[in-house]
Amino acid sequence: MFAKINAYLSARKEDVYVFAIIVLVALLSFGLGRLSALSEGQGEFRIIEPEGQAAAAVLSEGGEVVASKNGSAYYLPFCGGASRIKPENLVRFESSEAAEKAGYRPAANCKGL
């Protein structure tokens, strides 16, 4: 069996070389394309904040926490739950102790509380 394969390949050496070159060029092109796609996405980082939430995303120096008038939990201003509070329902507290005295509990999904 190996003798038949060897005889076939030796009779068509030029075809085998052309096929090998085509495959290598295709693999090289694919690899370079993947490499360029990976390097394009690493140049620039931007933080996008929802409109109207920029002020709520900054911690004040007094350790401010926020809550909703309609909710039962308080959040740090940069937590995801705080960004979903409507501005008309937003309640600000000077500290977590003040929020707990007002009847709010720490949000379970807000790390740091």
Image: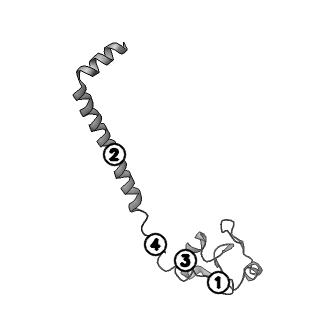
Residue 99 is drawn in which quadrant? bottom right
Image point (27%, 18%), residue name: 8
Mark 3 or 2, nearer chain start = 2
Q: Is residue 39 above or below residue 5?
A: below
Mark 1 or 2, nearer chain start = 2
Name the element at disc 1: strand
Name the element at disc 3: loop
Residue 80 is drawn in which quadrant? bottom right
Where does label 2 land, which residue? 28
Marks 1/2: CA–CA distance = 58 Å
Q: Residue 40: image x %, image y %? A: 38, 62
Name the element at disc 2: helix
Q: Nearer the viewer, mark 3 or mark 4?
A: 4
Where does label 4 land, which residue? 46
Amino acid type, residue under disc 3 in the picture: Lys
Name the element at disc 4: loop
Q: Nearer the viewer, mark 1 or mark 2?
A: 2
Q: Residue 4: image x %, image y %? A: 31, 13
Mark 3 or 4, nearer chain start = 4
Q: Nearer the viewer, mark 3 or mark 2?
A: 2
Q: Is residue 1 above or below residue 43?
A: above
Image quadrant in which the C terminus is located: bottom right
Marks 3/1: CA–CA distance = 13 Å
Amino acid type, residue under disc 1 in the picture: Arg
Tell me: 40 left or right of 73.
left
44 or 104: nearer the viewer: 44
Amino acid type, residue under disc 2 in the picture: Leu
Where does label 1 land, which residue? 92
Mark 1 or 4, nearer chain start = 4
